[in-house]
Image (cartoon, helix red, strand yellow):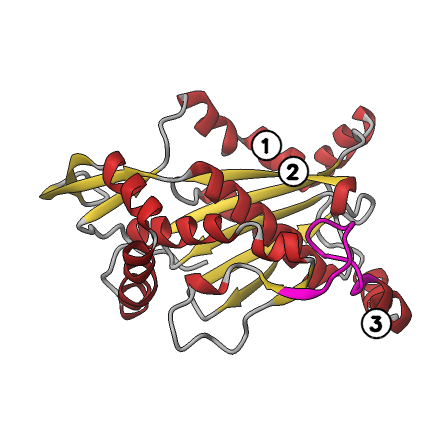
Amino acid sequence: MNRYALRPSRAVCTGERRPRERVLHAISPAVIQLAFLSVCPYNMAMDQQDVHNAETLRQRRAICAICGTAVATTHDHVPPKGIFPEPRPSDLVTVPACEACNAGDSRYDESFRVHLSLHVGRETPATQRLFVDEARRTVKRNRRLRRQILESLEPTYLTTRGGIIIDRGYRCRWDSEAHRRVIERTTRGLYFHHFGDILGANAKVTVYWFATLTAEMRKASRECQQASIGGNALVYRYGRAADQPLCSIWLFEFYGRHWAGAWTTPVVPIPAQMVVANTVSTL
């Protein structure tokens, strides 16, 4: 995945204050080992045979790929198309969705777009367009979101990755609920897009926030499939366990400056002996 050095912006968006152990837990070796199970290589033959079964796909496309229960009457962009400045890239991903899933999270999409823009800065042409064409326009139109951001602003020093102070500015906290919802919906949609299956109520999605990508995380995900949307706007890695299809791992990089992850697991717990066996196989 591409990496960029942190660059300052006039407003820096940070995650909400959380216990230190939660951040450490999110990137601990145990989490990575358990999440991967025997994720790679996944059974390509089974996936391709299933995805190319026309009747199966026809039936699945009649159901919302996000919730897995309601009838799909429209299509939803995953991730939201608003995080890509105009002109939109030609490789945007859409999945069948119901009206509730498509329109119900629009306010979270707007919040995610604005906070993402504040977080990644404005130092590249793409991030500058994201701020000017998308984030700033949203804040001008959305009074509630504008008030929320202004009330959360805190004075701060702008620093380089090495800790050198270069300016003064403001920071605001990420909207954690918007972040969780967008990443979860994106994960569910991309799971359907790549595997042709719907997670629905059979699986839960746990979302993680990463301050950066560690060498350990890169090593753990190097055998996964990699894809991108809009060039470097979104680069992500993904894979799922061959013997537990509802177990999958996702690693997202937005504009080379914001990282998030997701882990899907069955609602019914996996037998402990299976988790141990599969974890050992990844070491």
Asked if the residues shown at circle 1 and circle 2 are in contact, with their CB atoms under 8 angstroms apart, the answer is: yes
Q: Nearer the viewer, residue 117 or 166?
A: 117
Q: Position of residue 226 (x, y in %)?
A: 58, 61
Q: Residue at x 13, y 41 (%)?
A: 164
Q: Earlier in the sequence, mark 2 or mark 3?
A: 2
Q: In which quarter of the image is residue 282?
A: top right
Residue 147 shows up from this direction: yes
Q: In which quarter of the image is residue 148?
A: top left
Position of residue 106 in the picture relative to residue 18 (left or right): right
Residue 219 shows up from this direction: no
Disc 2 residue type?
A: Ala
Q: In this view, does 159 lie above or below 231?
A: above
Which residue position holds label 1? 31
Q: How many residues crowd mark 3 within 10 Å: few (<14), some (14–19), many (20+)?
A: few
Image: magenta residue range: 60-75
Mark 2 or 3, closer to the camera: 3
Disc 1 residue type?
A: Val
Which residue position holds label 3? 52
Q: Residue at x 78, y 65 (%)?
A: 61
Q: Is mark 1 on a helix, strand or loop?
A: helix
Q: What element carries label 2?
A: helix
Which residue position holds label 2? 35
Position of residue 262 in the picture relative to residue 110 (left or right): right
